[in-house]
Image (tube, helix red, strand yellow):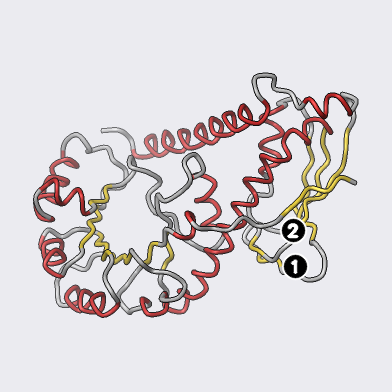
Amino acid sequence: MTNPNTLCTQVDHFKDHLVEQILALAMLEDLGPGPLDVTSAATIPQSERCSAKLVLKESAVVCGLNIFDTVVKCLSPEGKIEIVELVKEGTFVEVKDKPVPVAEISADARTLLAAERLSLNLIQRMCGVATITSTYTKIAAPASIQILDTRKTMPGLRSFDRRAVKAGGGTNHRFGLFDAILIKDNHVKAAGSVTKALQQARKYLQGEGKDLENRNIEVEVTTLDELAEALAEKAERVLLDNMPPDLVRQAIAKIKENAHQPFVEVSGGVNLANLESYLIPGVNAISIGAITHSAKNIDLSLEFE
């Protein structure tokens, strides 16, 4: 059997490599096969260095300031960049009358200009995701209910979105289809029932999937009958999907009567307008697709001095 620590290291390496590949594709998109920012090459001496400030133009939770460092080093591994983060990641910064500096940057002028738009695009999105996540988590905190992210992310941006969710006080769910078993409604239909899907999943973990690090099985249920099947099969986690608050309460009551007590997640149709109605004792977490698929980019800019 594969050592769990080795498996974890492999997954972490994969995620780091994924970020590198995403940035490489993004730079190829912006800089072409050169890579060359022709405007900077035409107007700025090659050895010129510059200083700039990253300024926040609207109130937000700050996230991803060191992205500039990552992008600059991807563009020019030998290039020198100095970043002083003026605000700690995850901090809410209120902007009133004028923009607020959140980082100071010193770097090669040509490289920094080439990195500017890509870095800003990522940071603006990360701040947006962190900010909306923070809004949800503050509402859910008194009930000790976690706010989870989902796979409803822009393709290629999941690593950045997940970091932003954590900065906003949220909790990361599974990264993708490879690191946890989550039996959804279409899996249930294809397998034949909740019971059959769970039984097949147990067999998988005993055989082909024996090295899967996260062995907790989560199953999505939409009715109390499906929940009864999940409890009978002792699913480690149940996801109450698209249930109105009254049905969630009935589901929680049914779970409390059972000897097996799974982790309870609620999902589907939960938003800021109705979140408080889902803060029901017995619910452990609520997954919100909107914190990543509907986040608004935050206005930031890079101002040269």
Quarter placement of the N terminus: top left
Residue visible at 23% across and 76% down? 247
How dense is the environment of label 1, judged by Cα within 10 Å: few (below 14), some, or many (20 and up)? Answer: few
Front residue (pair 245, 69): 245
Q: In the image, is 185 to the left or to the right of 137?
A: left
| Above or below 86: residue 212 | above
Give percent across and percent down for residue 152: 42, 51
Name the amino acid, label 2.
Leu
Q: In the image, is 14 to the left or to the right of 72?
A: left
| Tally of marks | 2
Give percent across and percent down for residue 249: 25, 79
| Above or below 189: residue 23 | above
Front residue (pair 296, 241): 296
Give percent across and percent down for residue 167: 57, 58
| Above or below 283: residue 63 | above
Residue under numbered circle 2: 56
Q: In which quarter of the image is residue 87?
A: bottom right
How dense is the environment of label 2, judged by Cα within 10 Å: few (below 14), some, or many (20 and up)? Answer: many
In the picture, the disc for residue 74 is none
Residue under numbered circle 1: 95
Q: In which quarter of the image is residue 110?
A: top right
Q: Which of marks 1 and 2 is nearer the N terminus?
A: 2
Q: Mark 2 falls on what kind of element?
A: strand
Front residue (pair 167, 31): 31
Name the amino acid, label 1.
Val
| Above or below 136: residue 216 | above
Residue visible at 47% across and 72% down? 272
How far is mark 1 from mark 2, CA to CA? 7 Å
Q: Are marks 1 and 2 in contact (CB under 8 Å)?
A: yes
Give percent across and percent down for residue 177: 33, 42
Residue visible at 43% across and 57% down? 149
